[in-house]
């Protein structure tokens, strides 16, 4: 018998004892290969002075190796039926705080202690595939103080996070990830490493937070409004995306003039533009916006 089979049988016995039933709405898939949680914690670079936020601990498969390495682990679990399971699995560790809550409904500002003199603040998670992007965007845009995010996601999502302009996978998530962090794909996990096995391959990816974003913009919200507008309907040109998705009071001709002034075709689509190019366009739009709606001045774009 291999170690994954033995761990699966142990999990089944524990879950049966607690009367636990899988809930499809939570996208629950527990790791049964004992080597993988250790590899994820290693990829995350967790050290003895670190504080770790774990989202979706499940049965505590990854919480245990985190607790062995970190100073403190804050484990947020949405399914209250798993809380007694977690308490049993983690009873030997006094450095784990279990929180029964939905991470999407939590304020993240006070998750990490503000007075930590040393040690990194890391986020580690096996994210439910049905809600991966909303959770990632909340973490990225929250402004919370963290050092890195190491997550296990569907392989296609990892490809989106690291895509290049002009490719099918490139989109708003790619740009958000590159604006806030430096992404690194660590390794891929096959479905038979989980119980129950998902229908897709999974990838572990680490996002290391930038000290400062790689581009400078005067209005960060406007930048991401621009990015979202350009990808809401990928078939639309950027001119149409801005015209229909942003309330700037600019005509399509005026938007085209701004794009042409920056060396772009008036028919350019968002998927062809880099983060740096989006930032340039956002700066021009912000310069216009300062003048107020319906006061377009061609001198802004020269």
Image: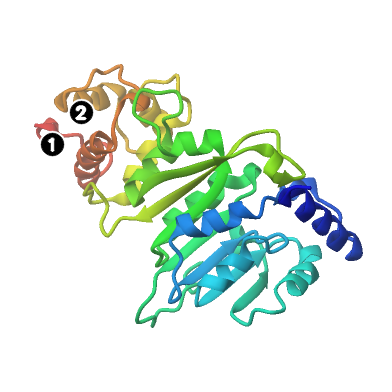
Name which residue lies at 82% across and 59% down. Answer: 10
Question: 79 left or right of 107?
Answer: right
Q: In which quarter of the image is the C terminus?
A: top left
Labelled disc at residue 258: 2
Labelled disc at residue 153: none
Give the image quarter of residue 94. bottom right
Up/down of 272 relative to 288, above or below: above
- Asked whether residue 28 is in view, the answer is no
Q: Toward the viewer: 79 or 187?
A: 187
Name which residue lies at 32% across and 35% down. Answer: 249
Q: What element carries label 1?
A: helix
Q: Which residue carries the number 1 mark?
A: 300
Report crowding for label 2: few under 14, some 14 to 19, many 20 or more residues within 10 A (C-alpha): many
Report crowding for label 1: few under 14, some 14 to 19, many 20 or more residues within 10 A (C-alpha): some
Up/down of 54 relative to 98, above or below: above
- Mark 1 and mark 2 in contact? Answer it, CB < 8 Å: yes
> Where does residue 110 sit, x and y in percent of width and height?
49, 74
Give the image quarter of residue 140. bottom left
- Asked whether residue 65 is in view, the answer is yes
> Where does residue 288 sit, x and y in percent of width and height?
21, 40
Name which residue lies at 39% across and 80% down. Answer: 116
Counting the numbered discs, the total is: 2
> Where does residue 274 sit, x and y in percent of width and height?
28, 33
């Amino acid at each position: 018998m291999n170690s994954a089979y033995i761990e699966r049988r142990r999990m089944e016995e524990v879950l049966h004892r607690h009367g636990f039933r899988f809930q499809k709405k939570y996208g629950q898939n527990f790791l049964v290969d004992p080597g993988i949680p250790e590899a994820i914690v290693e990829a995350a670079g967790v050290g003895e002075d670190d504080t770790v936020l774990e989202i979706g601990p499940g049965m505590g498969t990854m919480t245990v190796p985190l607790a062995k390495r970190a100073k403190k682990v804050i484990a947020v679990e949405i399914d209250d039926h798993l809380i007694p399971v977690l308490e049993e699995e983690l009873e030997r560790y006094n450095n784990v705080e279990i929180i029964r809550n939905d991470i999407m409904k939590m304020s993240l500002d006070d998750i990490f202690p503000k007075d930590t003199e040393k040690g990194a603040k890391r986020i580690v998670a096996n994210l439910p595939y049905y809600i991966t992007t909303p959770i990632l965007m909340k973490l990225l845009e929250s402004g919370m103080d963290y050092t890195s995010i190491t997550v296990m996601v569907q392989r296609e999502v990892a490809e989106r996070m690291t895509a290049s302009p002009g490719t099918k996978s490139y989109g708003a998530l790619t740009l958000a990830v590159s604006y806030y962090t430096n992404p690194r794909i660590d390794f891929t996990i096959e479905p038979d490493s989980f119980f129950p096995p998902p229908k897709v391959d999974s990838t572990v990816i680490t996002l290391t937070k930038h000290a400062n974003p790689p581009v400078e913009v005067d209005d960060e919200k406007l930048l991401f409004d621009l990015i979202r507008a350009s990808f809401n309907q990928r078939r639309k040109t950027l001119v149409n995306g801005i015209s229909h998705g942003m309330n700037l009071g600019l005509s399509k001709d005026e938007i085209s003039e701004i794009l042409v002034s920056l060396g772009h075709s008036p028919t350019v689509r968002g998927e062809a533009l880099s983060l740096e190019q989006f930032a340039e366009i956002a700066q021009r739009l912000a310069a216009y916006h300062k003048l107020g709606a319906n006061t377009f001045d061609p001198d802004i774009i020269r």
